[in-house]
Amino acid sequence: MIRDVVKDVEGENVLLLGNEAMARGALEAGIDVYAAYPGTPSSEIADTLSEACRLLKGRTEFYMEYSINEKVAFEVAAGASLAGKRGMCGMKHVGVNVASDTLFSFAYVGARGGFVVVSADDPSLHSSQNEQDNRWYGRAARVPIVEASNVQEAKDLVKLAFNLSEEFQLPIMFRSYTRLSHTSGVVKLGKLPEKKLERVEWERSPLSDVLVPANAIKRKKVLLEKIERVRRRFDGVEINRVEGGEGREGVIACGISYTYAKEALGRIGVDLPVLKLLTQYPLPEKLIENFISSLDKVAVVEELDPFVELHVKAIAKDYGVKVYGKENGCFPESYEYNISIVERGLAKMLGKGGGGSDELLEKVNTISSIAPPRPPVFCPGCPHAATFYAIKKVSKDVGGAALPSDIGCYTLGVSKPFETVEICICMGAGVGVSNGLSKVLKNKIITTVGDSTFFHATVPAMINAVYNRHRFVFVVLDNSGTAMTGFQPHPGLPVRGCGEQSKPVKIEDVAKGCGVEFVEVVNPYNIRKMEDTLRRALEHEAVSVIVARRLCAVLWNRERRRKGIKIVPFKVEDGCDLCLECVSSFTCPAIVYDGKKVWIDEALCAGCGVCAQICPRGVIKPKTEG
Ligand SMILES: Cc1ncc(C[n+]2csc(CCOP(=O)(O)OP(=O)(O)O)c2C)c(N)n1
């Protein structure tokens, strides 16, 4: 809880979420600047620091912002580092793809003040479009990576990462993952420094900071030298350590897999030596060599790719040690691990066969199978549902439009009855691919993206459409927030990361400024107007932008509650002939068909009135008092 994150009681034990622990680690490290674009499982680091920067004003000062996207967030933190301040940025794993251009070259420039980028990976794709293992980024960009195995370490390693960054003048990647970011654990608090955020004089350093080829060629060498020094340091750093028993079989375990491996060994009933590896790149070769040289067999336990395994194999060859990992089928290469999976893999190495009963998982599966299914649906009153209703209708009238879309709450439109999301690749790709589709499809094209996604990654693709005379209708689903990840603000809103006021950037102004000629703003609750606007936009012989603007129903409900405004629900009056248009084409969770009649659940109804407009008999009316 935020109260515990900002607590100034050194040595006290508190219960923190992994992401809160990272935020606390940043505070204890005396962070100056934090920048982020939200994305599960990283979002709570930013949300926690957003609250903390308000609560700690005048005590432990720092600047926090939600940036427009991950590349900019990275650059905001890098700017702070170049000025000698401590900068940190956080993002989900795919966010690092967005920031990667800067990441690769910033490694050449190097950090001045401590610089930490948190990459929160998502094994098992709980809330992501892919399962990439971001340790490869460290290898490819030559950026050292540290990884914690529990919540306490998460806090401590963030602090260590800042120190390492300054010691080696390198950006450091702190790699988290869902099971760490979203696990709660007891954390012993360190000291919260008293500090002001003061401005400093700029110190020029063009030989390192200006990456023209003549400088960059030298910086590459400097970078490789730094990495070799880090490697030697990681050989002796105390977070990497050998634990446990004796014998000719051992285990190398990384991050959360270390915790699983320790429990699995206990279940098998053996006490093998375990090398706990919390630095993932560069790998401490001497330490690994010393560890495996006295073994016959070693298991490498790590989630996702065989990253450490490949390196261990190369070393193991010289010592004739057999490596048990993913490549010989001991451990899977996909999805999260658990104790049972690790137990089975270790049992294989030990020739014990079987092992690893999925008792716990079986229990979870039994409970899941008796729980009523809850397919993801739009909330009652969701403006996206209203827009999709109109899009579906208009699309049908033009013989079936192609319907590319993007990532956000609105991706739920992929399901019945809407089926209005036909492409969803990664943030911004919906508009990007519409550019290509527009030159090869016979069909009309209606593309949808959210407001946060609009700012994050679609503006260049929109300009491209104007410039190259592509033709499609681009609907921005503007619900005034980044709803999917927890309503973080974005440039279209009047508030910023630490609660300061801002001047919102209007989507329609951006579109007009970029040369779009057809730009209209519509309230999607007005179904007829939305349909009419879509039809006119489809006639426009270039890209057209419709801003479907209506506050997210969750926020609308909160606002009404705060202001004491009563929600007026709708009801089905006599005369309903059970055509079921409202149920089968709109599926608002508040509308119920019980097999005999259609009725509206007052407790759920948001009072948006969209169902009243689509009812062919006109029998859905507001339920006024009396
Ligand atoms: C590169 C990248 N960064 C972050 C995310 C996480 N994410 C997915 S969609 C989204 C934005 C959703 O907001 P918006 O576009 O406004 O749609 P809404 O959920 O409000 O309907 C975010 C932050 C991601 N998938 N990819």
Image (tube, rainbow, N blue to C red):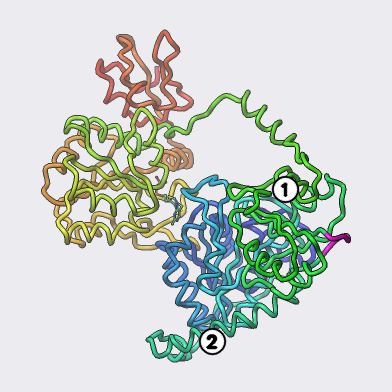
Q: Nearer the viewer, residue 592 or 300?
A: 300
Q: Is residue 574 above or below residue 179?
A: above
How packed mark 2 is, by other alpha carbons closer than 10 Å (few <14, some 14-19, many 20 or more), is: some
**Residue at which label 2 appears:** 222
Question: Which quadrant of the structure image shows residue 20?
Answer: bottom right
Residue that appears at 58% across and 77% down? 114
Indicate yes or no whether the magenta region holds residue 349. Answer: no
Left or right: 382 with respect to 20? Answer: left
Give the residues in magenta.
243-248
Q: Is the C terminus in the top left, top right, bottom left or bottom right quadrant? A: top left
Task: Measure how far apart labels 2 and 1 are at the Cα level.
Answer: 41 Å
Magenta stretch, overall SS? loop
> Is residue 501 visible to us here?
no
Query: Where residue 142 appears, x then y in whole percent?
Result: 54, 74
**Residue at which label 1 appears:** 345
How packed mark 1 is, by other alpha carbons closer than 10 Å (few <14, some 14-19, many 20 or more), is: many
Query: Where residue 185 appears, x then y in whole percent?
Result: 73, 53
Query: Where residue 461 appears, x then y in whole percent?
Result: 27, 58
Left or right: 549 with respect to 20? Answer: left
In the rendered structure, which amino acid carries the disc numbered 1?
A: Gly
Q: Is residue 142 above or below residue 248?
A: below
